[in-house]
Image (spheres, grey):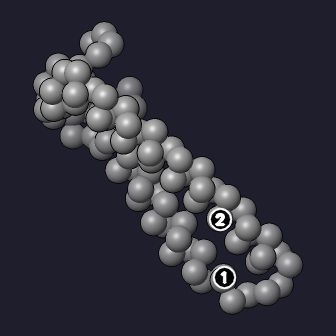
Amino acid sequence: MTHSLITDDKPDGHKLEDILNSLRGDIIKRATKIVDDHRPEAEHVLKNNIRILELLTEAVSLAEDSSAVLTRAFGPNYKGGPPRIGKR
């Protein structure tokens, strides 16, 4: 069972892209708090956060693409409905 994503056991879960977007927003808020701190440690953490944001942005695009493929092929996903692919 997943803790956050939509599944048969958790029909009120979230789409992957929504979770990734939320994480991205949290990291942006956190990064803005250290952007003017020029100590080496803060700059190192900011650099890491920027890289993480790049990877999250790529992951969001992939998740949105998968959702679009499934919607084109099988129609919209209804909460509580049968899975569009895979086994129950």
Instruction: Count residues near mark 2 (Cα–Cα under 10 Å), then give few for <14, some for 14-19, many for 20+.
Output: some
The image quarter in which residue 39 lies:
bottom right
Q: Which of the two labelled residues, at mark 2 and mark 1, occupies the earlier sequence position?
A: 1
- Image coordinates of residue 64 in percent, x first then y, are 36, 41
Tell whether 4 sits left or right of 52. left
Q: Label 2: state its secondary structure.
A: helix
The N terminus: image quadrant: top left
Which residue is drawn at the image coordinates 73% and 67% (left, top)? Answer: 47
- Image coordinates of residue 51 in percent, x first then y, are 67, 58
> Which residue extends farthest right?
40
Residue that badge 1 annotates: 34
The image quarter in which residue 31 lies:
bottom right
Q: CA distance from mark 2 to mark 1?
A: 12 Å
Which residue is drawn at the image coordinates 78% and 76% (left, top)? Answer: 43
In the image, is residue 52 above or below residue 31?
Answer: above
Tell whether 38 sits left or right of 3. right
Which residue is drawn at the image coordinates 80% and 70% (left, top)? Answer: 44
